């Protein structure tokens, strides 16, 4: 019996050797040094080739092109290639491909946003983990936060041709986006600033002081001019609230949105001024559609033919009125999911983006999507 078992074991061992080949070592598996990448689908073009500029003739029939429910902050890059979104994330949308890239998660309420001319830096207003309002600068090359500060209540803007970010807070802080360091200046502190803008040539900062729109030189930091929007009623000087500002792409036009109580509703106007002659071209009365309605944002189309004006009523209701600059005529009305706190055209005027309160997110309109 033992002899039979021994022969059986020897037979199995011999068969195993024959299978391996005489003197041939067993191969050891090695990882592939150059793995084949997994193919990915090519994204469909985001922008139709036939997209037309928004005009007075087609504005009343615009199409809802895209909606970002959780991103109420919105800004186009100056070259028209990118859309910046702020909300539950800071995100960039490649407008050619339609690819949305989330850069960083965020929490809490989110407000205005802006992108530098070279598309590298993004300034945005948000809340930190403690629920406090802060301003941050994001570097898109290093994907890091350059700076966080408890600043800015009334918007932010990059000075054209620079990486300097101006904040609408007391003293109008200016920051170098590359390192977050303050830029020294002597512009007078305006605690009542409610609008903030910069002329396209980068030479003048535009802010408000009560009922005045004030222009300050960015070379000398001195006030160059101011426009007074107060008026007299029954012998008493009254001042509307200057709550919206738009500057045309070429710097020739400036528009303001003025708010007032129901008792002084005659002060509720949208005014378009010639920036060179300092003369009012259009004074357009606006009518409240909801209780507590107010003008909160405005933007010119790139060709200066249209002025889009955003409204809010503090109850998450909003809409947009679009006016013909040449005549002051109301040529279009657009629905909005909430109060419209940011409004902007893209570089060629084919898209109109609305940034609303947190509940509404942002929406983009086009002429023929």
Image (cartoon, helix red, strand yellow):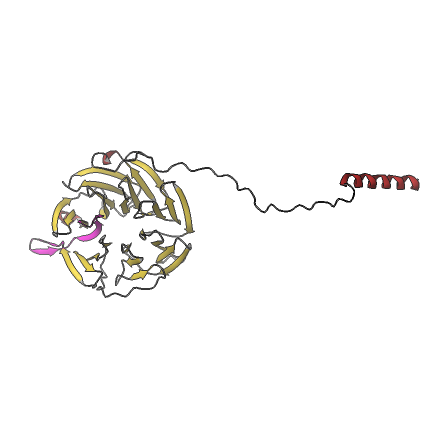
Q: Residue at x 38, y 55 (%)?
A: 138
Q: Is residue 29 magenta?
A: no
Q: Nearer the viewer, residue 209 or 207?
A: 207
The magenta stretch spans which residues? Answer: 228-252
Q: Quadrant of residue 164?
A: bottom left
Give coordinates of residue 7: x percent, y percent.
Answer: 89, 40
Residue 268 seen by the camera? no
Choose between 241 and 134: the one closer to the eye. 134
Query: In the visual, does 98 lie left or right of 52?
Result: right
Of all residues, the one furthest to the front in this rendering is 23
Q: Residue 205 or 251: which is nearer the viewer?
A: 251
Residue 222's x, y, as percent?
19, 63
Location of residue 330 in the rendering, given as x and y in whole percent from the top left corner? 18, 39
Can I make out residue 55 in this image? yes
- Which quarter of the picture shows residue 127? bottom left
Residue placed most toward the observer, 277 or 32: 32
Q: Is residue 217 above or below residue 328?
A: below
Residue 247 part of the magenta-drawn span: yes
The residue at the point 14 percent across, 52 percent down is 276
Q: Residue 286 vs residue 131: left or right?
A: left
Q: Most extreme residue toward the left, as rendered? A: 235
């Amino acid at each position: 019996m033992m002899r039979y078992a021994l022969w059986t074991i020897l037979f199995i061992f011999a068969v195993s050797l024959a299978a391996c080949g005489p003197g041939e070592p067993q191969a050891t598996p090695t990882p592939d040094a150059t793995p084949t990448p997994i193919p990915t689908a090519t994204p469909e073009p985001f922008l139709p080739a036939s997209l037309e500029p928004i005009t007075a003739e087609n504005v009343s029939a615009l199409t809802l092109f895209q909606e970002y429910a959780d991103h109420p902050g919105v800004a186009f890059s100056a070259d028209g290639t990118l859309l910046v979104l702020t909300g539950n994330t800071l995100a960039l949308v490649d407008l050619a491909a339609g690819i949305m890239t989330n850069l960083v998660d965020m929490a809490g309420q989110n407000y205005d946003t802006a992108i530098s001319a070279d598309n590298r830096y993004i300034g945005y207003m948000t809340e930190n983990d403690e629920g406090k309002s802060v301003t941050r600068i994001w570097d898109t090359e290093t994907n890091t936060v350059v700076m966080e500060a408890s600043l800015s209540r009334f918007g932010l803007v990059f000075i054209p041709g620079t990486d300097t970010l101006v904040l609408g807070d007391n003293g109008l802080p200016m920051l170098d986006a590359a390192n977050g360091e303050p830029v020294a200046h002597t512009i007078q502190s305006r605690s009542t600033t409610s609008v903030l803008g910069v002329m396209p040539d980068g030479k003048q900062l535009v802010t408000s002081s009560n009922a005045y729109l004030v222009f300050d030189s960015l070379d000398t930091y001195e006030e160059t001019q101011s426009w007074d929007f107060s008026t007299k009623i029954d012998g008493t000087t009254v001042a509307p609230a200057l709550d919206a500002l738009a500057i045309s792409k070429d710097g020739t036009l400036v528009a303001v949105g003025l708010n007032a109580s129901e008792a002084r509703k005659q002060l509720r106007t949208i005014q378009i001024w010639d920036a060179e002659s300092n003369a009012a071209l259009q004074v357009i009365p606006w009518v409240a559609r909801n209780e507590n309605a107010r003008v909160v944002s405005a933007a010119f189309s790139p060709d200066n033919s249209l002025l889009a004006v955003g409204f809010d009523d503090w109850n998450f209701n909003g809409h947009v009125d679009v006016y013909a600059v040449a005549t002051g005529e109301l040529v279009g009305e657009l629905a909005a999911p909430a109060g419209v706190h940011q409004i902007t055209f893209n570089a060629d005027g084919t898209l109109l983006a609305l940034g609303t309160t947190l509940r509404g997110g942002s929406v983009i309109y086009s002429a023929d999507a």
